[in-house]
Image (cartoon, rainbow, N blue to C red):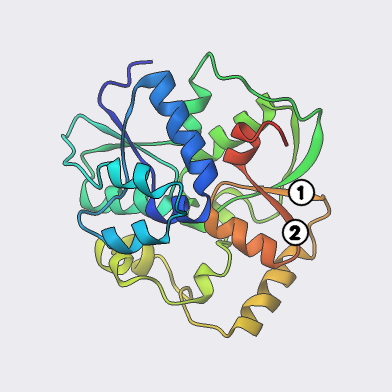
Amino acid sequence: MDVKNYTYVASCVFTREEPELSAKIQDYLKQRFNMQIIRCCVPNYKVEEFTADMPKWLQPRWKDTPHYKDFAADSTMVYVCHNCAAIFQETMPEVKRLSLWELILNDTEFPFPDYSHEKMTLQDCWRSYDNRPEQEAVRALLQKMNVDIVEQEENYEKTQFCGISLYASSPARNLKLAPRRFVEHAEEKFIPHTKEEQLELMQEHCQPITTDKVVAYCHYCIKGLKLGGKQSKHLASLLFDTQE
């Protein structure tokens, strides 16, 4: 796999929410591909604020990671965050986008753990509802790990879920840089709700789920599923937290 023009966007928000997991992903990409890694999808966006939000052990490494870079038209950005992907799609459509899941699926040497056909419900994300290659890669990875996937009725392009993030105001940056995704195609979304309303909505969403574990590939989805009372597992955790 030729990855010389690939750059991984580690995502400020994902790294803040999942610091240990983010570090493991970055270690894998560096050791396996010597891939360049940057922090953010937008230049000069809350650089100091996000650095301060990181755990102390991660801050030196995060500071040493370039915040941003300019992308050439023939380059590829590898993403774990759907916000990053949407912003690149609308501001730099000439740059190719590849999900981390598609990259791992094409790594013939990746050491897939074995989950012994445990049943897990899969949660698709609204922020990536129209990204069929990513959705198919997610399912292929779960199959390689011997996870028995339980599909929800609202899956693939039908999904309307992204945790409580759709029941709160959207960051102004997203509305400005990716208006097709977050304004034009977001009818009745990003409307603020109270914490009590958010909790009730997450519980309602999780109530029909019958399996002990729910797999998601979005940090907002993970938080929403946990709030709703489910044992949610990030796909990256299944791949990299193999001691679990």
Assess disc 2: are there few (<14), some (14-19) or many (≥20) residues with their C-alpha within 10 Å of its C-alpha.
Answer: many
Report which quarter residue 7 is drawn in: top left
- Determine whether, in the image, residue 146 is placed left or right of residue 1: right
Decide: is 126 above or below 71: below
Report the residue marked by disc 1.
Answer: 213
| Label 2 secondary element | loop
Q: State the residue at coordinates (28%, 48%).
A: 88
Report the residue marked by disc 2.
Answer: 230
The answer to the question of whether label 2 and label 1 lie on touching residues, with beta carbons closer than 8 A, is: yes
Q: State the residue at coordinates (32%, 21%).
A: 3
Q: Is residue 56 visible?
A: yes
| Label 1 secondary element | strand
Report which quarter residue 66 is drawn in: top left
- Determine whether, in the image, residue 113 is placed left or right of residue 131: right
Q: Which corner quadrant holds the C terminus?
A: top right
Q: Give amino acid for label 2.
A: Lys
Q: Which one is nearer the viewer's eye here, 127 or 198?
A: 198
Instruction: Tell me where residue 123 appears, x and y as whole percent.
Output: 64, 51
Report which quarter residue 111 is drawn in: top right
Decide: is 8 above or below 215: above
- Determine whether, in the image, residue 92 is placed left or right of residue 155: left
Assess disc 1: are there few (<14), some (14-19) or many (≥20) residues with their C-alpha within 10 Å of its C-alpha.
Answer: some
Q: Give amino acid for label 1.
A: Lys
